[in-house]
Image: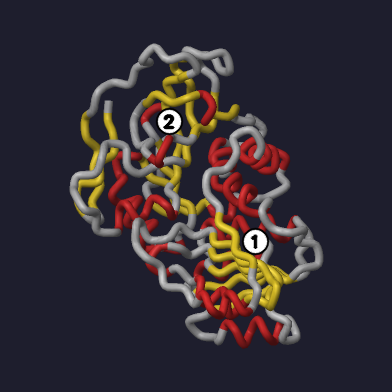
Amino acid sequence: MFAGKITAKNRIELVETEEAKLNGDHGKIIFQPELCCLCGSDLPFFCEEQSAYPLNDGMSLHEMIGTVTATSGERFKKGDKVLAVPEGQCGFFERYELTEKRVIPLDPRQPPEVALMAQPLGTAIYALRKLPNLMDLNVVIVGQGPMGQLFNACVSNLGARQVIGIDRVAGRLEMSPAMGATKIIDCAQQDAVAEVAAATNDRMADVVIEAVGHSNLALNTCIDLCRHDGHLLSFGVPPIEKEVSIRWWDLFVKNISVHTSVNPDFERDFPLAMQWVSEGRIDVQPILTHRYEVAKIQDAFETFRDKTDGALKVLLDFPANGQKSPNGKI
């Protein structure tokens, strides 16, 4: 059985590891991934210098669908197709044991790659439940990567007056109107604060969502974009175990409410996301840009890291899927 292993900064390999098995605890399954995709929260483990290499087997992968191959619980049976989310993003295994509490059924009404998007969409839904009613509000989404694009679609569906997408990568901004943005701002070429001020008659945004994260965390820019008494949702994953510089005085005097979000609810958020994509309420197809067989994992991570050819969501086919991957842009 294979596992993914990050052996150095910007280097990931497939290695042999012990076969997964049930250890006697009730309510567990053996999950066999078939189709997975990379997430921005996987990148810090790949791109940022870690204290010791190699990292543990299985780092880092967590957006995945596949099959239950064994169970010690009652919720699922052998052969069931499911969406599973491993603990601590440690799911890069050919098979692994997992509590059935972190698994939901797969809806068969859409292709597998569409159903897979219920995982990232579920994280957006969980975050948005922390915010006020978005009807008639001006919402700015800083960062137009895969999650920013999903936020565009969600916020548009929830009735926002304006959905303003901001990024410095022109190729990503080109996708934003198709995902629900009513205005786009290229912050590499335009003054984002001035553009938002003009679009809102100097009121600024009622809600600002930070969807960049990592070393490029844009919280201070978000403070400038947000109106007095507005809301700031810090969604982007911050640098691992590092201090973040933020202009807290400006945040304080503008009386901005700050929300953070991680670890959605498996009883509410992921099932609702599966329902949305299965019913076609949100079209996720535009963000599915690249696909690789898992043997090409180094190429897949580099494509995702470098945003090659407009990469947004990069899919991975595991051997159990039997799918012949294009190994590049779809």
Tell me if residue 170 can be seen. no
CA separation, marks 1 and 2? Answer: 29 Å
Which corner quadrant of the image does residue 88 belong to? top left
Residue 121 picture location, percent across and down:
60, 47
Q: How many marks?
A: 2
Residue 158 position (above or below residue 60) = below
Q: At 72% across and 40% down in the image, what residue appears?
A: 279
- Residue occupied by mark 1: 152
Q: Earlier in the sequence, mark 1 or mark 2?
A: 2
For numbered disc 2, what is the local secondary structure?
A: strand
| Residue plotted at (50% across, 17% down) | 27
Residue nearest the observer in this picture, 252 or 61? 252
Mark 1 crowdedness (10 Å alpha carbons): few <14, some 14-19, many ≥20:
many
Q: Is residue 55 left or right of residue 275?
A: left
In the picture, which quadrant includes the N terminus? Answer: top left
In the orientation shown, which residue stands out farthest toward the right? 136
Residue density around tag 2, few if under 14, some if 14–19, many if 20 or more, within 10 Å? many
Residue topped by disc 2: 33
